[in-house]
Structures are given as structure tokens and as C-alpha cells.
Image (spheres, rainbow, N blue to C red):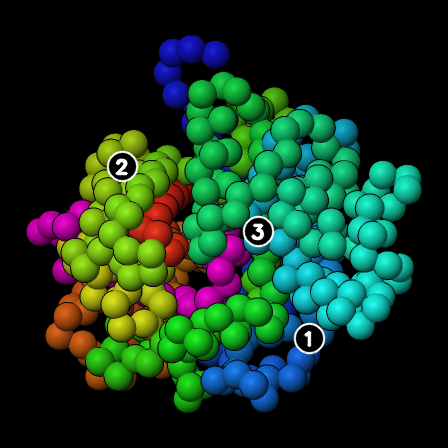
Amino acid sequence: MSGASREVLLTGFGVRTAFGTGADALRAGVFDGRPAFAPVTRFDTGPYRTDMAATHGPAAPLHEVLAETAGAAVGMAGLPAGARAAVLVGTAGDFTGLTRFWRAAASGGSASGGSPEDAEDTDGAAGGVARTVPAWQAEALADALGVRGPRLAFTGACVASATAVLHACALIASGRADTAVCAGAYLVEEENLAKFGSGFALSTDGTVRPFCADRSGLLLGDGAAAVVLESADSARRRGARPLGALTGWGAAADAHHVARPHPEGAGLAAAAGRALRRAGGPRIDYVNAHGTATRHNDPAETRGLREVFGPYADAVPVSSTKSTTGHLLEASGVVELVITLLALRDGVLPPTAGFTAPDPLCDLDYVPNRPRRAEIRRAMTVNAAFGGTHTALVLERA
């Protein structure tokens, strides 16, 4: 299709965090400002810098968690079995399964019950280590949903699932697809707990305090979510009820440093500026921030948002829901999109929990500690990842 860009509507979602499954679990946890951090029991945390994270029971296979949340999204949207839809997944793969596989292989077996050479079953179905890779997650999800269409996995760390949403928006707006299921999932496991701990990025006191002077780092969290996006024409034909509209999206890479953000938030400002230009203007009623509570991220993010909003910056409420859910890594973008959607629909701003003394370098309105009633018509959610990659999504009432 050529010509004008098509409207992108959100018609269904499913979500799971440490608070449980569904929107009401988010309302009772994230929107109440109640952190979900507790000692991890699914593996031995003795070797690591902290034993705290936001987890939800034992670790399940990642593809099952993706299927659960995407199934809920498809059900809410009323998407029929056998529909044609792109399936776009943000994931680094199943780290828990991969760790289990290599430990078993090192002891003479494999996680699939055979030798390491049995990673591929004779019938062609991925087994063993092959089941843990990102591409397999996208294939398995599409098969579980029974939909037809392109299947892609996005592995861009903490912007992975947001990038999946961006790609879906571009496909639908340009007429290359009518419908897309976008999903992302991460479950707390040993490898990333070790990596973030060795980089001194984890809070060691069990509290995440974004934008505060005494912030000491992030904590990881379980998260999975999926959204159904479709063109307005598609939704109208099916009689689907739109929950919101994706009116702006943008991505940027400032390539400032392998791990640290650009000190002026250049990448974030570029991504958010592109999203706002596409959405038709700079006015925003709420921003769901990346907000990791790390030393370098929070002031850089603040400067980037000030660059974007200019004279309006002091009037824009900003909060970090990672203060309650933990950092969901590859799932952050899509889970935080669902949180932003609920804020828009409920007229409630989720707070930045654990807020203490403000940092002079972080001088925006961070909705400290308590939810706030507000009239929200347009909201933005932003994410960042190592290497200077950034995403921004603008969501409006449908």
C-alpha cells in the first residue's frame, strides 16, 4: 500500500509480572507503589552480590510463559484461529534452559535427556539447547497461537520487545501487514544476576530508588507481556474494540559507550523526538521512564527528557515502574507499554516507589511513592539498552 500512513490500534494484551497475571495484578502492585522484591528461591544465590529480585514462583519454560501472555492478548482481541498475523518476539532466549543444558552436558548428559549431540531431534523439532535460542521462541509462539505470517525474534537487550512493537507499527502503518502479535519475556536466572552483579549495577539493600540521590542500582524481575496491534481497517472489519492507538514510535543509537548512556541523553532525545514528531506534537501527559536507579542512567535520562520537552518538561509527570517490577530486560518494553496503557485508560499515574531524597541532577516530577489521579490522553514509554540504543512509543486514547 502506498500513500498515507495507516492508524495502528492496540486491541488486546496479556501480561505477567512478579505480582501475578493480568491487569488487576498490576493495579494492585505497580499502581499501588508496592515493590515485589524478595529473596530468590529458584536457584542458589550464594555466589552473587544480592539474593533479591522480583520473581513469580518457580521458573517456567520461557515459551510457555510467552504462550500464556500472548494467548491472553489474542483472546482479548478476538483474533480468530488461523488468522494471518506477524509474530514478533523480544527475547534473548531461555537462559534457565541453556544453563541447565550445559550443566547437564558437562556432567555427561543433556537437559533433553540425551547426549549433547542430541540437541536436534530426529523428527526435526528443536530439542535440547536449540529450544533455548531466540528464533525458536518466535517459531514456537506462532505455532502455539495457530497464526500465519512472518515470525521474527529481536535480541536488542533492554529494547528488544519495544523494538518488536516498533517494527510491527512500521509494518502496519505502511500496509505490509494488517495484524501483529508482539511479545517479550524474561525470567530471572543466574547468568544475568551474575553479569549485572559483576558490573556493580545491582542494589544490595533490596530497594530500587530511581532518580534519588541515594539510589544504588537495579534489581531484576520476571516479566512477560504481549499486545495485538492492527490497522484501523482490520479492527473495524472484525468489530474489535480498540484499547489505544500507537501514534508515534522512534528509535536511535548514539553509540556513546558500550554500557554507559550518553551523559546528555542524546539517544533518548533522538528516539523520543522522532516518536513525538510522528505523533504530531510535543505535548505528553505522562512518561513511563526507563529509570534503572543506576548512577549514570537517571541523570542522563532526565537531561534527554528536558531536551525533548523544553519549556514543558516541568509539567510532564515521569515515573519508573522498575521500582516495583524490577528490570525486566528484554520484556521491559512491552510490559511497560501495557502499564502505560492502563495508566491511560484508568486515569492513574503509577508512582516511582521507594522515592527518598531527590538528586539535584534529576529534577523532574517523578510521581513519588503514591499513585496520582490525572487526565491522560497521550503518554510515552521509553527504553534504553547497552550500546546506546533507545526506543520511544507514544500511546493515545482510541
Distance of label 1 from label 3 (alpha carbons): 20 Å
Left/right placement of residue 201 relative to residue 168 reads: left
Q: Residue furthest left?
A: 311
The label number, if any, that marks residue 6 in the structure image:
none
CA neighbours of label 1 inside 10 A, class few (<14), some (14 to 19), many (20+): few
Q: Are marks 1 and 3 in contact (CB under 8 Å)?
A: no
Query: Dot 2, how many residues are within 10 Å of its Cα: few (below 14), some (14-19), or many (20+)?
Result: many
**Label 2, on which residue?**
274
Check disc 1 and report the residue beneath it. 57
- Tell me which label, 2 or 1, sits earlier in the chain: 1
* Earlier residue among tags 2 and 3: 3
The image quadrant of residue 142 is top right
> SS class of the residue under badge 2?
helix
Which range is magenta? Answer: 307-335
For disc 3, the marked residue is 91
**Comparing marks 2 and 3, which lies closer to the viewer?**
3
Which structural element holds mark 3?
loop
Q: Quadrant of the C terminus?
A: top left
Dominant SS of magenta comes to: helix
Q: Is residue 73 visible?
A: no
Q: Amino acid at mark 2?
A: Arg
Magenta-span inclusion, residue 308 = yes
Q: Earlier in the sequence, mark 1 or mark 3?
A: 1
User: Residue at horizontal 83%, vertical 42%?
Assistant: 125
Q: Mark 1 falls on what kind of element?
A: loop
Q: Position of residue 243 (x, y in %)?
A: 50, 43
Confirm whether residue 130 shows in the render. Answer: yes
Residue 4 horizontal/vertical position (percent): 37, 16
Looking at the image, residue 376 lies above or below residue 237: below
